[in-house]
Image (spheres, helix red, strand yellow):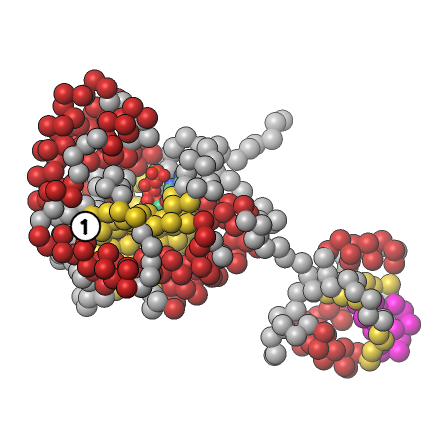
Amino acid sequence: MNNIQSIRGMHDILPAATPTWRWLEQQLAELFDAYDFREIRIPLVEKAELFTRAIGQATDVVEKEMYAFPDRNGDTLSLRPEGTAGVVRAAIQHGLLASPGLKVWYRGPMFRHERPQRGRQRQFHQFGAEVFGLSGPDIDVELIALGERIWKRLGLERGIRLEINTLGDREDRQRYRAKLIDYLSPRVDELDGDSQRRLHTNPLRIFDSKHPQTRAIMTEAPGLADSLGAEARAHFKEVCKMLEGLGIAYRINPGLVRGLDYYCRTVFEWITDDLGAQGTVCAGGRYDDLVAVQGGKPAPGIGFALGVERLVELLAHQGRERSQAPQVYLVCQAPSIEGLRLAEELRDQLPGLRLACNLGGGSFKAQFKRADRSGAQYALVLGESEVAAGLCQIKDLRGDAPQETLARQVLAERIRQLLPGLSAD
Ligand code: ATP
Ligand code: MG
């Protein structure tokens, strides 16, 4: 029989890669803590309607990319293509919006049926942040500052730049929509098929087209900036001023409209040139109408989501992958129970120690070879005579410190001295 393979665009994350993932995940969790965010965990599956309502019908995500399927009871369910809609649903459902200033973050897999290519998977992972009840520009700026701090913490700040824009308020976009339709209508035949269809449903989204000819037409399009109302204009000006106050470099990109319908006012993307065509590592913006659209008491919102696969690739690109190795490898030439017993003793005494116990026997030579290949810094050597005398040897596998023979009672203490990073416990 032939082997069953994983689904196209849905990747295994193999043991060689998981140390980098775990390191990255830990850094991000710590940074969200540092900005006083709380974690929220929401289901991978929701009613499909949640996404069609929140994200909008005339969007790539809903039109083409959603994994939707009938449940056994006839409901249409969907694998979540993004996190914001579910977070908003949960916040309304559990009354989390009662007091303003809720700050939450989430992580996990998202699912979109798009064409798999570099930087685009069908199952991919995001970390995201959402903030509710704050309408001022300060939170926009804090979220951007958090993004910048993330790149710094990961050592990626040199390759990632910030683009921002404002989409104005709903009325501003209505006004602009009419102008855009006027501009595009005489050129409709030159647009790609998707954009032709969107001309009257969602013309702003034509800015998102990847089609070269459409893009060329859009670079000449009238700008949204001229249609902005006074409040949206003041909000954006303040955002820019505060970014400058924090020394955060940005570029205003008038063509930045973001893929989902719910955005208004500030939108932003963090972009790199090191990943080929899919260079956006993080994207976000304000969505002041979304809570009301989802049936909640109106409350402004703002958030971002970052793509973990793209960050992992950037880390690899800069040679910053992590690896995992045991610190100590226990070589045992006595009955296996003696090796297992010593290993358990050490795990009791040194809970943080990464210890590999030789399993499956083997000659001294074979075991030392495995110890070396494991990447461990030290080998512990336990032979029949050591067991009888209550001793154990420590051998430095990477340096030339002389081999030591120690009493079992002081072994844990000695390992602690040799591995100063070990937690004291
Ligand atoms: P794009 O214009 O590239 O399709 P998007 O607007 O669909 O992006 P968002 O929904 O804003 O992307 O998602 C936020 C981030 O999640 C992206 O900037 C990217 O880093 C990541 N991301 C989105 N879709 C994918 C995917 N299919 N595979 C891998 N990462 C993705
Ligand atoms: Mg997309």
Residue at 24% across / 27% down in the picture?
Answer: 217
Q: Quadrant of the N terminus?
A: top right
Q: Is residue 194 visible?
A: no
| Up/down of 229 relative to 419, above or below | above
Q: Residues within 10 Å of mark 1 (few under 14, many from 20)?
A: many
| Up/down of 299 relative to 277, above or below | below
Q: Which residues are magenta?
A: 380-394
> Residue 182 at x, y = what percent?
10, 28
| Up/down of 267 relative to 174, above or below | below
Residue at 83% across / 78% down in the picture?
Answer: 406
Which residue has dot 1 on it? 265
Nearer to the camera, 134 or 80: 134
Position of 40 with respect to 57 (left or right) is right
Q: Is residue 185 visible?
A: yes
Q: Quadrant of residue 200?
A: top left
Task: Give the number of marks.
Answer: 1
Nearer to the camera, 246 or 42: 246
Task: Please name the amino acid that badge 1 sits on.
Answer: Arg
Asked whether residue 7 is drawn in magenta, I would say no
Position of 33 with respect to 368 (left or right) is left
Mark 1 lies within 8 Å of ligand 1 (Cβ measured)? no
